[in-house]
Image: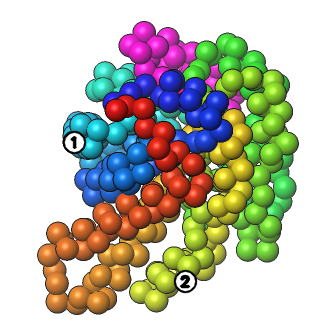
Amino acid sequence: MVNTKLMFERAYLGKYAIGAFNVSNMEIVQGIAQAALKTNSPIIFQVSPGAIKYAGLKFLVVLVKTAIKESGIEAALHLDHGDSLKLCKECVDAGFTSVMIDGSSLSFEDNVELTKCVVDYASFKGVSVEGELGRLCGAEEHIGGHDSSYTDPVQAKEFIKRTKVNSLAVAIGTSHGINKFGLETEPSLRFDILEEISRLCTGLPIVLHGSSSIMEKEVSEISKYGVNLKKARGIPEHILRKAASSAVCKINIDSDLRLAMTLSIKKFMHENPNNFDPRFYFKAARESVTDLVKQKIVNIFKSENRNNYN
């Protein structure tokens, strides 16, 4: 496992992004590792507080470490949306190479104070820290045009100066979940805000959360097996590609993984109604994860053949 600092420095200069994929079980970890290996790409495995509650911190650390060791890929283990100093400390002590402290729901001053505490603890142990400024909005807020959700570039400069974070998650129009835009709204991101943050914070690696594309083809196909995602709409790939060629060095993906896995399992069970062996349908799910991650590495992030570990 590697620290994200050098990983992001290379991505920033090379005008590409690193895919950060949420993991919660063995098959997802293996699928991501295989995709990174086949494309010779650096990768970030990230674990949310929900995943820790589901699978256990020690289990997830061992799974990721094993996948990295066996594949020989360049990878980081990252805490996604750490919600407390306590959890960030636990992850640093458990062997994570990067942690995020999400103080975006706090006042600016409280966010600075909390983030700085995490940076002080993590940096002493050689662990990178991602902060967040601004609030990711949902589809209904895109429709209403609530600009108050977006990251303030001037505040971002002050935040970086005072906290010394290694990267910053910003709010420029992405959102968590599968309903990122209203069906009648043209998907778009505030690249003007992104450019201003990049201008004021030269060299700063920027992170985009909530960046699944929720492809129409998969949404249509999974509906055949009883899953209703009619309102699902993600970030178009060409928009993410534009972001990845800027100062955005890390792009987070979760919902697309869930969609791919669920679709493959539903399809397998429909086509093999008498097969109740989980090794078969989880194998199909793992392969779907590999295919998805490979596609994003090659078509969006452009991080193939950037593995510097070997």
Return the disc, 2 or 1, that comes first in the chain's sequence: 1
User: Residue 47, how many percent across, how many down?
Assistant: 39, 42
Q: Residue furthest left?
A: 277
Asked whether 267 falls inside the magenta stretch, the response is: no
Tell me, yes or no, whether the two marked residues, 2 and 1, touch with CB atoms within 8 Å.
no
Q: Left or right: 23 with respect to 136? A: left
Q: Left or right: 68 with respect to 150? A: left
Residue depicted at 65% across the width and 38% down the height: 15
Q: Quadrant of residue 250?
A: top right
- In this picture the colour scheme is rainbow
Q: How many marks are shown on the rendered structure?
A: 2
Going by the numbered disc 2, the residue's amino acid type is: Ser
Kindly identify which residue carries mark 1.
Answer: 70
Residue depicted at 29% across the width and 71% down the height: 284
Which stretch did the figure color magenta?
105-134
Assign the N terminus to one quadrant of the image. top left
Q: Residues within 10 Å of mark 2 (few under 14, many from 20)?
A: some
Label 2, label 1: how far apart the Cα atoms are:
36 Å
Regarding residue 183, the answer to whether it shows in the image is yes
User: Residue 81, how many percent across, how many down?
Assistant: 50, 38
Q: Assign a secondary structure to mark 2.
A: helix
Kindly identify which residue carries mark 2.
Answer: 220
Where 144 sits versus 48, above or below?
A: below
User: Residue 27, how many percent across, how many down?
Assistant: 27, 58
